[in-house]
Image (spheres, rainbow, N blue to C red):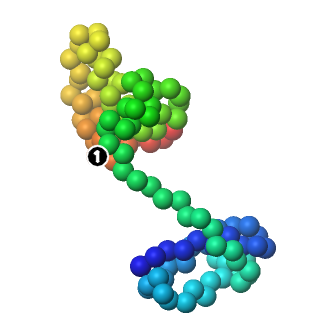
Amino acid sequence: MPIYEFKCDDCKRLTSVFTKSMSAKVDAKCNNCGSKKLSRALSKFAYHQSTSRVLEQHGAEPASLEDYKDPRQIGRWAERKFDEYGMEMPEKAREMIDAARDGQMPPPVDEL
C-alpha cells in the first residue's frame, strides 16, 4: 500500500496520498489549499544503519552537535569517558543509555 507525495504548484506545500495499490488511480488535491495542480515529489526514506556503519560515518567522537541527536552516539561517548577515567557508570546513567538505545530519549536530551 504505497504513499505518494505531491508538491502543490500553487502553495508549494507537500501532500501525502495513501493508495490501496500501486495500480490504483491517484486523484489527489492539496491538503493545505485544496488545489488539484500537483506535481509528483520524491519521497524521503529511512534505512537502518548497523553500529559499524554509524561509527564509520560519525567516527569515534561526535564531530558536531548534530551527532548528539543520535542516542547511540551519546551512550558510546559516555561509556568511553567513564572507562577512560576508570570510573563505574552510575546505575541511573546506565538506565538512560539503555532506554535511548531502545529509542526512548531521556527527558534532558528530548527537551533539546
Q: Is residue 66 left or right of residue 40?
A: left
Question: Where on the picture, by quarter, is residue 42?
Answer: bottom right
Mark 1 is surrounded, within 10 Å at the Cα level, by few (under 14), some (14 to 19) or many (20 or more) other residues, namely few
Q: Is residue 53 left or right of residue 38?
A: left
Mark yes or no: residue 41 visible: yes
The spot of residue 100 in percent (x, y) is: 32, 41
Residue visible at 36% across and 50% down in the picture: 48
| Residue that numbered label 1 is attached to | 102
Type of the residue with mark 1: Asp
The spot of residue 76 in percent (x, y) is: 32, 28
The spot of residue 49 in percent (x, y) is: 36, 45
Element type where label 1 sits in the image: loop
Q: Is residue 82 above or below residue 41?
A: above
Residue visible at 21% across and 17% down in the picture: 88
Mark yes or no: residue 73 visible: no
Q: Is residue 49 above or below residue 65?
A: below
Q: In the rendered view of the protein, which quadrant contains the N terminus?
A: bottom left
Question: Where on the picture, by quarter, is residue 13?
Answer: bottom right
Numbered-mark total: 1
The spot of residue 59 in percent (x, y) is: 42, 27
Q: Is residue 43 left or right of residue 87?
A: right
